[in-house]
Amino acid sequence: MGALLALSRALVGLAARSLADLDEDVTLQQYRTLVFLVSYGPQRVVDLAHELDVTSSTATRLCARLERKHLVARQERPDDRRAAWITLTDSGRELVGAVMRRRRDTLSEMIAELSLTRPLALAATLNALVEASGELPDSQWWQRLEAARQ
């Protein structure tokens, strides 16, 4: 458990550095919102609040900041004008892709320095943790990022 906690701290640090290198004006919470939109598509503010474990008013303010930065857009749907739907803009998608590519490159460098005797077993364990967390597997996530382009 200690090793997993240490790894999670290292990965949060890596995410923060990758984001700061590209756009220091976006917080980790805002970035997490953008990643969620890539993974699951347009969302109502109330659903984002639930996912991020914040109040609806906090999610509304967070989305307003992202909208001012042109990373998301608000849309009304003809079938539900009461709720604003938050969608990723091209700029938001490009930022997420750039940060993820930077993270992938850094992790690749780190892994290249390791001498793993059972790399497939490690990959299977990591993928099981991803599944248990409710996150998308990496290949599906990149497919969604590409689909958000259309």
Image: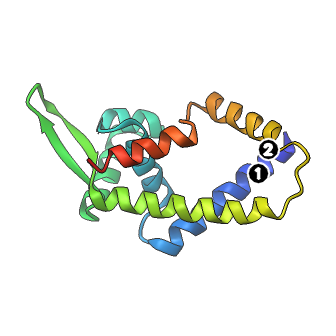
Q: Residue shown at 8%/30% (left/top)?
A: 78
Give the x, y percent position of residue 42.
Answer: 29, 39
**According to the image, label 1 marks what residue?**
7
Crowdedness near tag 2: few (<14), some (14–19) or many (≥20) residues, C-alpha within 10 Å: few
Q: Nearer the viewer, residue 73 or 46?
A: 73
Q: Nearer the viewer, residue 136 or 82?
A: 136
Residue type at the position of mark 2: Leu
Mark seen at residue 126: none
Tell me if label 1 and label 2 are in contact, CB under 8 Å: yes
Q: Is the N terminus in the top left, top right, bottom left or bottom right quadrant?
A: top right
Q: Label 1, secondary structure: give it.
A: helix
Mark seen at residue 4: 2
Residue at the top extreme, as displayed: 79
Quarter of the image where one finds residue 37:
top left
Quarter of the image where one finds residue 11:
bottom right
Left or right: where does residue 60 sit relative to residue 48? left
Q: Label 2, secondary structure: give it.
A: helix
Give the x, y percent position of residue 12.
Answer: 64, 56
Residue type at the position of mark 1: Leu
Left or right: where does residue 15 sit relative to residue 87? right
**Residue 65 shows up from this direction:** no
Q: Residue shown at 25%/62% (left/top)?
A: 70
Left or right: where does residue 23 sit relative to residue 111? left
* Numbered label tally: 2
**Residue 23 shows up from this direction:** yes
Q: Residue shown at 79%/44% (left/top)?
A: 4
Give the x, y percent position of residue 65.
Answer: 30, 59
